[in-house]
Image: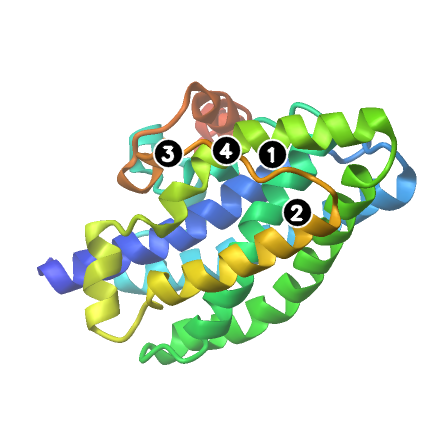
Amino acid sequence: MNIHSQHKIDYLLYLADTALILGQRLGEWCGHGPVLEQDIAMTNISLDYIGRSRLLYQYIATLTESDEDRLAFLRDEREFKNVLLAEHPNVDFAYTVARQFLLEAFHFPYYSELKNSSDLQLAAIAEKTVKETAYHLKWSAEWMIRLGDGTEISHQKIQTALNELWSFTGELFDPADYETFMLQESIAPDLNSINKSWKEKVQQVISEATLTMPENQWMQSGGKQGIHTEAMGFILTEMQYMQRSYPGLTW
């Protein structure tokens, strides 16, 4: 496999893995949401992400000798390229909201730009994705404001979540080698322009939510290169159990 093909596969895995792992995290709320309406909302968003990952894995399968099930259920931790923020534990509703908002504020401008990709199949996936992401961003931003400008307890909880998750946001804008290569090929968006849009949206919502912008400048990284937090092993153990226990299982 030449370097162009490998960079493209790695880039598609980064997008697909981030969607799958975040979908798995959100799916953990099914039946456990704070109220029925939000339980259903988070489950629906989870399904959007898993659907996105399927489209991307199916595309990868056309470029490799694999298939979407093998890519999702039979790879080891170091082979996944999702960002660390996606795998962060739910902890509580505030953490889930903050994690979702920080990622959606990134995903909306990102997939809006990806619609212009020179890769027409990826551009078509982005076209579908950005419509879903517009709702995801609206939902998470409204809850950031509702919790931040709510009670003393809700304000404290969402501020705590924001402070802890902030150190995982830098990785979004730190390009891996495959991202740089894809940008040169006019396939991937320019992260510098995405960063500007992300900061503007985050600052606007944090201000409206009466929250304080975190001051932490040190950032976590590694997920895009397959170096994950301890949480990742637990996610894969649960997610991959059936397929690894019963190889070739089909529904």
In the picture, measured across the screen, residue 210 lies left or right of residue 35, that is left
Residue receiving disc 2: 206
Q: Earlier in the sequence, mark 4 or mark 2?
A: 4
Residue receiving disc 3: 219
Locate residue 137, reporting x and y percent.
Answer: 66, 57
Quadrant, the C terminus: top right
User: Camera-side residue: 100 or 154?
Assistant: 154
Q: CA distance from mark 4 to mark 2?
A: 23 Å
Residue receiving disc 4: 87
What secondary structure is found at the residue carrying circle 4?
Answer: helix
Residue receiving disc 1: 162
What amino acid type is highlighted by mark number 1? Answer: Leu
Q: CA distance from mark 3 to mark 1?
A: 14 Å
What secondary structure is found at the residue carrying circle 3?
Answer: loop
Q: Earlier in the sequence, mark 3 or mark 4?
A: 4
Camera-side mark, 4 or 2: 2
Asked whether residue 94 is in view, the answer is: yes
Question: Tags 4 and 2 in contact by the CB under 8 Å rule?
Answer: no
